Amino acid sequence: MIDHFKGIHVIKLFFALCLTAMMLAGCSSDKQVGDSAKLALPDGITLVEIRNDQGSDKVAIAYSKYKLDNGLTVILHEDNSDPLVHVDVTYHVGSAREELGKSGFAHFFEHMMFQGSKHVADEEHFKIITEAGGDMNGTTNSDRTNYYQTVPANQLEKVLWLEADRMGFLLDAVTQEKFENQRETVKNERGENYENQPYGLRTERVAEALYPEGHPYSWSTIGYIDDLNRVSVNDLKAFFQRWYGPNNAVITIGGDIDVLETLSWVKKYFAPIPAGPEVESMQKMPVSLDADRYITLEDQVHLPLIQLTFPTVYVNHPDEAPLDVLSDILGGGKTSLFYKNLVKDNFAIQAFVSHPCRELACQFDMVALANPEKSTDLKQLQQLIEVTLTEFESRGVNEDDLARTKASIRSMTILGLQSVAGKVTTLAMNQLFSGQPDQVQYDLDRYNAVTAKDVMRVYRKYIKDKEKVILSIVPDSLTQLAANQANFALPERSFTASSVSETVETTPIQDVFDRSVMPVAGPNPAVQVPQFTRKKFDNGITMLAHGNSETPTVTILLNLEGGPLLDSIDKAGLASFTASMMNESTQLMSNEEMANQLALLGSQIQFSAGGRYTQIRVNSLVENLDETLALLKMKLFHPAFLEEDFQRIKQNLIQQLLQRKNNPAVLASRVVDNLLYGSHNVVSLPSSGTVETVSAIELDDIKMFYQRFYTPSKANLVIVGDINEKSIAKKLGFLTQWPAKDYTIPAYAEFPVYSKSKIYLVNKPDASQSVVRIIEKSLPYDATGEHFKSQLMNFPLGGMFNSRINLNLREDKGYTYGASSQFIGGKTLGRFQAGADLKQQNTADGIKEILNEIKTYQRSGMTEAELSSMRSAYTQSEALNYETPYNKASFLNHLLTFDLAKEYRQEQTKIINSITREELNTLAAKLLDTNDMQIVVVGDAQKVKGQLDSLGMEIVILESEDF
């Protein structure tokens, strides 16, 4: 529905707490880190500290910290459990460092940093990392910008060369053309993720009202279009010179590294870069209000939303931890008061409380989506929130409230010990904001120390009867639904922005080596496919189990084949609805009691249904596995199926489905499925059903589906974690001895056939962009046949960032934030799909360009260089495939889903290395016939139909209400 807004604090807490059991996991080598003290460090690098805490009772992330003469901070963390490394370069600059009237600069520069530098060609950064088998990206928030890559361990020097080149030599490659192109890309991103999304402007509007004009948090990270239009390339260059020096950066490297070798590379590539201007810490800037501020936003939404936002403290303030605990008690799931009073009583479809914290200020958010079946009056919803707060004050903090929170912290700590990236991110962020990379024990201590008295104190200090911003988001022209008449309007933006920022003198960089020569990677690391045991039980369950002691956790996936494919077309959504009911009350325990027990254990049990399966997913600490399995047994075999739960979930589902009609991407998916599979096939409908089909479902249908299809006869079971593979079946006896009842998955009815291409235009008035999908039926999944080869073939066309389609539409034309193509294959069905969210004024232009790229590729195929790039990317990415328990579980689940031998990836590697360009180009000629492709456009028909007429195809106009 809508995402919780997460500030720095939430991310920081999650990652920091995810690492708490580091000493239990044994992922890092304390001896190696300790021995780094004895290493002869390269000149110009100073050891600041080494932290391993070996033998202590403290929980810690082992690291060593260094400083270069130019001010660059270097943090190293050794984890030799997988042959990969993660590199994070974090600059202490975000939107908070921008000037009034020049918003969006930090985010703009995130884009520019991928546009090449003096020794790296335009778009080459993406190409190099992709061909190295790695992942990469960058993120910007109000307080920092980071760039990161995860690559096989043999590619580390290459990554350091790339990052140093854009730190020291970016401006040599910045041109007016690149500047203009990325300005358009940022505008497209704002359109796609903010303006064309329901509730997309929520956080921006709240920030404008909460913070005074000129406050660093009073504008959003992405910035305003007017500001983006106003700036010049010289403004941007000056911003880089001011903030992107090594003395304002932290480079953190974790994984399978050699300390001395890594430091020598850091010195070689980063030490010659001169320091930038001195950067002073920003003063904390928490705010206060003198009166409640009511604001109203009209939006293309179905469900009215209310948000109450209170100003609080700043990250690491002594009151931050008790405020976080307060937010969890009030609105942190099924045990919370918001759930009891708003969701369970059907006044809200969704309600939550959060306390996002940032470097300079924090805010306390209470959010609720109104349930129109009960009331759309946001004033009433605000009153219910205030009644809930009064109830909390009267009730106080229960013993279980604190126990749940502390158990969740401990669970997140251990369950999060899964990736090098998480550890590196934590070290980098803590160093940036506190000067101390390892804050894990600090965070644990401060949250463990929170008392009931602390929680009540911060409630009275920051929430009770305190001034706040009250945002109402209402459907267009229905401002009468707002919580109150707006009494606050953002002052007209009045400022004088200089046309050019002051430039900073830079010192020429003197090297003793040739930076234009890209480092050569070492030998590819050896990658081990997870070993597992396989067992077939008499009741039909096939189990794969993998024991791994890196973390004291267990993940269980139980898949019942059929899922939504077992629905009748008039009651589509039944499988999904049944799964939702399985998450509710049991015959032995209420919904809230079950949620409380799971929270106290720090465990999760989740039922869901989608695609071809009903899935039950369990996450548990090893020490709590027996208790968690007992709760799973209760939920699986003793559901209560209460009428009150049924009615509440049914109302919520219907309202969610009505809301989704306002999401252009959802509308596009609905039309795509309908065109491919026909309205007479249940597979053409969403797994969650439609308003009409869900409305037709009765409680007896739920009970019938459970009795017929919750059976192990077609079930697969995957277990990954700190287990004994041979004895785990004993703990799961209630599953392996579960009596089986066979059933049949219905066959599909005939699918539609098209003789020519048409455009299906879904009219969405006032849409700010056009969502475009170009589709045709294609091959179902196979591991080594034509479908697999089609993915290899598609890689240069639309399967990577540097693909032909994306470079054309995003980088060359500036029509979109991103464009792609892909072959999607399931067990029995497959499709080819290309598309993008396009600027409204370039809807037809964008479609024409995508079709032209596909036609050209069909005729001429890939080049030898593209073939080589594809081979490199696919073969070297193996090192990243099995790092986390989730990665391992997904691999095993994939084997069971498609009945594959564990060696299938070796077979794929042989194909990748031996397949010829001619074979792939022949496949392109066969599978990419644009004459068979249908085009779906979701946009404002009044504004785009004239453009589409120029394409010379028949246009079928549809209304969004039809879906």
Image (cartoon, helix red, strand yellow):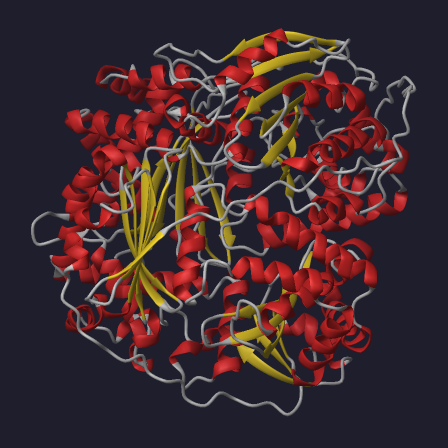
Tell me which residue sits at (32%, 65%) in the image.
654
Where on the picture, by quarter, is residue 940?
bottom right
Residue 96, relative to residue 599: is it above or below? above
Q: Quadrant of residue 264?
A: top right
Measuring from the top left, give residue 120's x and y in whole percent.
Answer: 84, 39
Residue at the far left in the pictured view: 588
- Whole-percent x, y for residue 865 in the image: 82, 58
In the image, 41 versus 364, the foreground residue is 41
Which residue is nearer to you in this view: 544 or 234?
Answer: 544
In the foreground, 369 or 478: 369
Number of labelled discs?
A: 0
Above/below status of 357 relative to 580: above
- What residue do we see at 49% from left, 50% from top? 199
Q: Residue at x 49, y 87 (%)?
A: 751
Which quadrant of the view contains residue 485?
A: top left
703 above or below 109?
Answer: below
Q: Position of residue 6 (x, y in %)?
A: 47, 36
Asked whether residue 793 is in view, the answer is yes
Depicted 643 relative to depicted 963: above or below: above
Outermost residue, bottom side? 755
Horizontal side of 739 relative to 358 (left or right) equals left
Could you say where residue 254 lies in the image, as x and y percent from the top left?
A: 58, 28
Task: Identify the image quadrant of the C terminus.
Answer: bottom left
Query: Can residue 436 be spotted in the picture?
Result: no
Q: Residue at x 59, y 42 (%)?
A: 526
- In the figure, is residue 454 to the left or right of 847? left
